Image: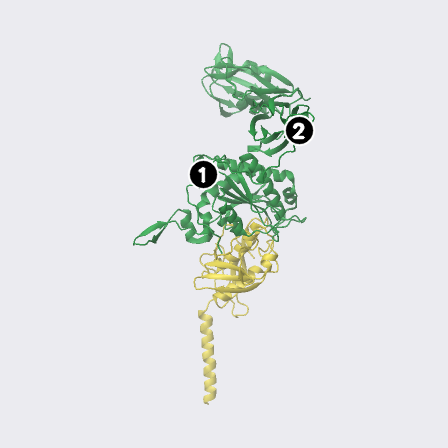
Amino acid sequence: MPRRTVVIGAIALLAIAGAAWLAFSRPWRQPADAPAGTSATPPTTTSDTRKITGTLYYVSEDGMSLVGVQREVPFGETVLDQARHIVVAQLGDAPGPFVSAVPPGTTLRGVFLTDRGDAFVDLSGEARTRHTGGALDELFTVYAIVNALTMNLPAVKRVQILVEGKEVDTLAGHVDLRHPLQKNLKWVRTDKTEKG
Amino acid sequence: MRIGVVLFVLGLSGAQTPPTPAPYTLFSSEGRRPVPARLISGQEMFSLDDLASVFQLALKEDSLAGGLIVTARGQSIVLTPGQSLASVGGRLISLPTAPVKDGKSWFVPVDFVPRALAPTLGTRLELRKASRLILVGDVRVPRIAGTVEPQGSLARLTLDVSAPTPHAVSQDGNRLVVKFEADALDAALPASSVPDLIQAIRPGDGPASLVVELGPRFGTYRASDLPGDRGTVRVVIDIIAATTNPNPGSTPAPAPSPPDTPPLLDIAPSGGIRTIVVDAGHGGTEDGARGPSGTLEKNVTLSVARRLKAALESRLGVRVILTRDADTLVELDERAALANNNKADLFVSLHANASVRASAAGAEVFYLSLEEYGDQAQRVAKGETEALPVFGGGSRDIEVILWEMAQARYIEQSAVLAQSVEAALREKIPMSPRAIQQAPFRVLVGANMPAVLVEMGFITNAEQEKQLTSDAFQVSIVQALVDSIVRYRDRPATRTGVAGAAAPRAGGGLRP
């Protein structure tokens, strides 16, 4: 029965391809330069629920620094997908006792990647309109996003933040956003990385 | 009981030390008494017997060691002949010269009083050699240094008072009386070079007061207080000439209003700092941060900027330009461009901070960080040049500075300015745990001169919001900023030149 053979063969091929995919494709893990103490969670078997562990950044209890927190982030098939998941997670609620560095209501409109490793993160207008307006808070907003991408994705070297699809001078009148920014950990509290 | 008040007036030329020095006057809440001094080997010394009588000290010679043990309030000071070190309660302190034993009497340098006796007695003992004073405890004897300068149709009497001292200026017939709330004045009063407006300045009749004898051309006067260096206060009294011939019945001339922009002085009066741009952060539709009671950052920054302009102009004689003098929107590019186009020597941007945490508090001083601007900015900062081809072959090293990175070559000076600002602010207002920081701030990067951004406090903190709107807090900030600019100007490294003057300025034009 040739037709049955073909069907069985096709199923077998799909099974082999699936097994090979499961065997050789590994979910994205923490890069080598991630903060000490961070580690990836074991991959799960179905793509819907697979997670990676990344370091996201939130405002500390005293408001004077960012704190790196290990959190689970949905797995992305590509660097671009993963970048998108990381930013969405970064824009989400902060784990207690920390506070989000990003103004409430801010959503991700899109992420773009260039071959040079520049990521463009397009945020909704709330990033500006609902900002506290403080210079330090502005630094925290910007570097929570810049660091979340550059620390977790080695392929991303620099990040430029856009608002409503356009380049902006600043979010709240201070931090220069006309250029892509490199990671900068000087506002990150270095004593520990929290588990989220 | 408040003590009687005595005025100590010194000549401007300074007191010369006579062969037999004049006695010191010990001034305490219990009264005054003289303490004789003696010159030994060119050093002014007090007899320990005299000090023992004044301060109830017990003296006991240590026959074995040949020293002397001075005891007061259970603590001991051990002196050794020939040794300029003394042990005070077990800690060594240095004296300008060794104690001297003359016959049965011991003599100690006058500095023994503040250095050894004060910590032993646990009280303030301030020695003022120039005015021959020893101040004990909390007596208030501010130092006052006066100058008189003719300024067109007026004479300006400036009194620099060493500590904030409440005072009042009033007219009493043909004289002005300046009364201070103090126990005495330690004043160096000037002679008047404008006798038709100010005949003389002399001690007043009342407690801690000065009298300005007015000249025949006197029309009216105006008095104002300005912050001075290092916590001092400057009282400025302008004696303004009458517009008509002196006539007792004539109406005094109104005080002339100061020009909007003081003329540039031909000779830089302030160590090369001629123009300062003060940037009131935000404005117009850009409110900046908002306090819990609704205070807007843009209003606080404008208020402080105006005060700072007035203080800098009066104190330093410099031209001060505000990036905005109203509630208007000024683009960040325009702020730096205004400073650049006016060849400002310093750029000071004023802001109030905000945090998602209501508890965050304290002032912060920022200057630009270059790391975010890549390699080119770093090269500019290091003074590196680029070799560009020229007609006829070959190449020439040319400094290429993008206008938008003009700040790159001033980073070191901006760091020094930031340190000076931070140190002065710390003396007067609460500072954040991160008092000095570097950040890629948009308003600083294009400034072609040393530039800092001052976050004066967290407006989102309810207590700081009240402070930021209060006169006292704003005056403290202004005093600190003026102090810091004076210190920056007078720092040793720039005494011989203008900060950044040797470096060519970046080419003009706004970045589109």
Q: Residues within 10 Å of mark 2 (few under 14, many from 20)?
A: few
Residue A42 visible, this angle: no
Indicate which disc residue B498 carries: 1
Q: Quadrant of the N terminus of chain B?
A: top right
Quick check: do tags 1 and 2 share a chain? yes
Give the chain coloured green: B
Which secondary structure lies at badge 2? strand
Snapshot quadrant of residue B242:
top right
Q: Residues within 10 Å of mark 1 (few under 14, many from 20)?
A: some
Residue A186 visible, this angle: yes
Q: Nearer the viewer, residue A8 or B3?
A: B3
Marked residue nearer the N-terminal end (1 or 2)? 2
Percent position of residue B190, x then y: 56, 23
Residue B417, compared with residue B82, is above or below; it is below
Residue B371, compared with residue B101, is above or below; it is below
Is B66 on the left or on the right of B166, as rendered? left
Give the chain coloured yellow: A
Which secondary structure lies at badge 1? loop
Badge 1: chain ID:
B
Is B40 on the left or on the right of B74, as rendered? left
Percent position of residue A45, x then y: 51, 69
What residue is shown with label 2? B168
Amino acid type of disc 1? Val
